[in-house]
Image (tube, coloured by chain):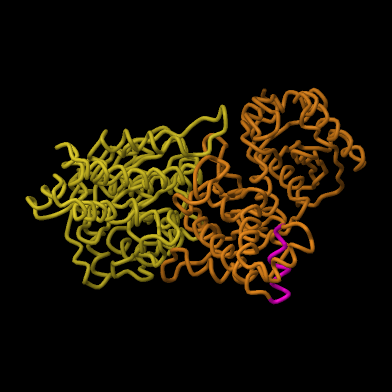
Chain colours: A yellow, B orange
Amino acid sequence: MAYYVGIDLGGTNIKAGIVDDQGQLLNKDSIKTNAQRPMEEIIHDMGSLAVKVIEAAGLKKEDISAIGIGSPGTPDNKAGVLVYAGNLPFKMAPMRKLIREVIDLPVFIDNDANCAAMAEAVAGAAKGVKDSVTITLGTGVGAGVIVNGVIYSGFNQAGSEFGHTVLVSGGEQCTCGRKGCFEAYASASALIRMTKEAAEAAPDSKLAQVIKEEGKVNGMTAFKAQRMGDAAADGVIDKYTDYLADGLANAINAFMPEVLVVGGGVCNEGDPLLIPLQEKTMSRPFFGPGVRKTRIALAQMGNDAGIVGAAMMGMSCVNEKLDGTAC
Amino acid sequence: MAYYVGIDLGGTNIKAGIVDDQGQLLNKDSIKTNAQRPMEEIIHDMGSLAVKVIEAAGLKKEDISAIGIGSPGTPDNKAGVLVYAGNLPFKMAPMRKLIREVIDLPVFIDNDANCAAMAEAVAGAAKGVKDSVTITLGTGVGAGVIVNGVIYSGFNQAGSEFGHTVLVSGGEQCTCGRKGCFEAYASASALIRMTKEAAEAAPDSKLAQVIKEEGKVNGMTAFKAQRMGDAAADGVIDKYTDYLADGLANAINAFMPEVLVVGGGVCNEGDPLLIPLQEKTMSRPFFGPGVRKTRIALAQMGNDAGIVGAAMMGMSCVNEKLDGTAC
């Protein structure tokens, strides 16, 4: 049995764990990122956390085949460098070099959305499938593309930024600068915006009532009001699933994956989301007669997707015989 | 030197030629498709045309490594079957079996847009590059994706149908049934629609005058009127390149190719198309600081792209050790 360390670098927490070559998570631990610190300190702590989870699992350094790191932003896995990381203070961060100063193992690095896709491909909703796409609906919309069992992220490792493909030309302003991106219509943030707009337009609805009682709006609000029987909530979910389905159909037409995995907090709603989504999405892609169709599934890896995915990305790099020691 | 037969199956003509392993076309020939015939007859004629071009090049069957066929629609290259082919009379056509009855060589089959992308990747605008995307602007919008030197067309070989990703949700009706597809805004047909609309709105424009004189509208009309100095024509080209740039930026964000190749008849306009297109497109994709950017280039393979691409697709299948004899 081969073992891998997976490190999930986030804006608030750094999580790490030991994962076996079947994608099973043996243990995990976490520390605060404290993102205002110098990047060298943060990376040093990531290395120390790796040492800690290896010891906690009763393993030695020699038992570990590689460390995989999942991060926001764009890595340069060849150079072992995190080129940039969105809101985190990493610019051309020599990730591999600094981690290896703490623990001398091969280190690989990739985007967090790609790692989430790898987790689903190895041990989750796309297990056993060679071509899959995982779309994660959070504050933004992440996308990871697996081609022939390996992460595909373009020539510069910056892709796939499928969340920033325009779906509604000239539409809602997106954080990326463009207008009408898929992300601006399908993220949890977009669902919250639609929920607020609908509640304001129908102040006597149960949707407005729920918001008043709870004093806040989140991705669950509309589903909660829908369960109480509310036309305004039905309208929100209908609108949201409509845009989401359009974007998912686009992802199918672009990549033709065997399985399209949809993840993120909103997916905890289960069938009330999945069933209309499947119906709407599957009528839209361009399948000719007799052509096999993509299957849509909810993500299965939950909160551990980041750790497991980072570890399995590391495993994939080892299998591809990439050099995890070159700096 | 290894040689391949490339066959370009179209609705009007079937073209074939001999291509060497550097993508050089040695000779070519063509016959009418006569698409109303039984598919068995058409396929038989394709085999005979292959025999003819081999002889015309002074080669023997033994000199040929494989026959590659580029076709509209969706192939099943594993089974050697053309599953369907849009407007052509092929349903589950046993392409490999019937061609091999005429000439006993390995036969491979793929979508024509994929073959065009392969031609550009081996010998055209994306030569020497591992990851490229070729978008062909014709009656529709074709897309071929090359990942790591090999055609990527999804688990079912039906992709990438990037032309049928929605760009303008709820927009112009597309032939695929959806509304607002990239194809409905970026094809030559879309440019013709925009040209007609602008001429109707400005009957005193040079654009309207050109149409009146020529008695027709095509993809060149607006560019011709622009060269005469015409605001209505400027408007058409501005609008068309704006949508096209939005779709190309989407393709970059989705696939992050090193080179994005744009082909099709409209590209014969050269710089008056390419320069605004590059400027508009490159401000839109999601590249983080320090991340290498995609290059946009015009297709170079012209009318022979179909033959060369089909042959090079065949070469790629031979290199991948796929079985071109299994039926």
Q: Is residue B198 left or right of residue A58?
A: right
**Left or right: where does residue B197 sit relative to residue A57?**
right
**Image x and y of residue B86, in percent:** 65, 35
Specify the farthest residue to the front: B203
Q: Going by the image, does B270 lie left or right of B156?
A: right
Q: In which quarter of the image is the C terminus of chain A?
A: bottom left
Say which of B327 and A149 sits in front.
Answer: B327
Name the foreground residue: B304 vs A82.
Answer: B304
Image quadrant in which you'd find residue B33: top right
Tell me where residue B26 appears, x and y as whole percent.
85, 49
Quadrant of the image for the N terminus of chain A?
Answer: top left
Question: Residue at left 44%, top 71%?
Answer: B290
**Residue at the image position 38 percent from the left and 55 percent from the top:** A110
Query: Would residue B225 be counted in the magenta stretch?
Result: yes
| Stretch of the chain drawn in magenta | B218-229
> Who's the residue at 15% across and 46% down the image?
A205
The answer to whether B115 appears left or right of A86 in the picture is right
